[in-house]
Image (spheres, grey):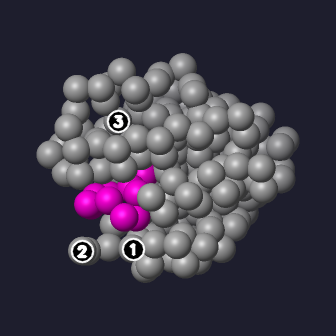
Amino acid sequence: MDKKKLYLLTGFLGAGKTYLLLHLLNNLEGRKIGIIQNEFGKLSIDGELVNRSGIEMVEISRGSIFCSCLKPHFTLALAQMGKMDLEYVFVESSGLADPSNIEEILQEVSTLSGDVYDFKGAICLIDAVNFPEQLADVETVDRQLAHCHLAVINKMDLIDDAQLQHVVAAVRGVNPRCALKTCVNAVWMSP
């Protein structure tokens, strides 16, 4: 069995994580996909997925999957999906997630299910409109951005160039190495 491609989606509430996930699912229609959702936002993906075949879904609520209280549930969910015949697994984390321990969690999953994942990286969605105010929550912003492989600035249609430059500078101040993309409604604008 081939390794499952694993992606972690992070970002504050309202940044567009669920829209991005739905966009990805539409592009991967017909593929075998697993989803672990750790947040109930305004847009539930349940209704969108009810009639789709090939999708396995687990919802984990009442806290962050990276905290000690829910980490065992998250690890077990990943381990169980690791035993399924899936091509992709997407994890949509809560808006306050601290993904700094994802490597440790994947080591625990490997102990339970073997080396079943190809961790492609963490994608951090950024709400371009509200990000300047969210910067006040330095700890959460730093955790999510510092550990992402790709930062996606969403809602580009709602800001001007000056605000974009401010957001980009703030992102680069925390993580100068990650790839950076811009989008509207979680659909890539740049290549």
Q: Is residue 169 above or below residue 82?
A: above
Residue 1 is tagged as 2
Rendering quarter of residue 71: bottom right
Going by the image, does 88 lie left or right of 10? Answer: left
Q: Nearer the viewer, mark 3 or mark 2?
A: 2
Residue tagged by mark 1? 116
> Can you say which quadrant of the picture contains the N terminus?
bottom left
Question: Does 87 appear in magenta?
Answer: yes
Question: What residue is shown at x 62% (from left), y 51% (from top)?
Answer: 73
| Pointer 2 local density, CA inside 10 Å: few below 14, some 14–19, many at least 20 | few
Rendering quarter of residue 2: bottom left
What stretch of residues is rendered in magenta?
81-90
Residue 189 % position (x, y): 34, 45
Q: Is residue 27 above or below residue 2?
A: above
Q: CA distance from mark 2 to mark 1?
A: 8 Å
Question: What residue is shown at x 26% (from left), y 60% (from top)?
Answer: 85
Along the viewing direction, whichever of 110 and 145 lies nearer the viewer: 110
Going by the image, does 85 lie left or right of 170? Answer: left
Along the viewing direction, whichever of 167 and 120 lies nearer the viewer: 120
Q: Nearer the viewer, mark 1 or mark 3?
A: 1
Q: Are marks 2 and 1 in contact (CB under 8 Å)?
A: yes
Residue 92 % position (x, y): 52, 45
Residue tagged by mark 3? 22
Q: CA distance from mark 1 to mark 3?
A: 24 Å
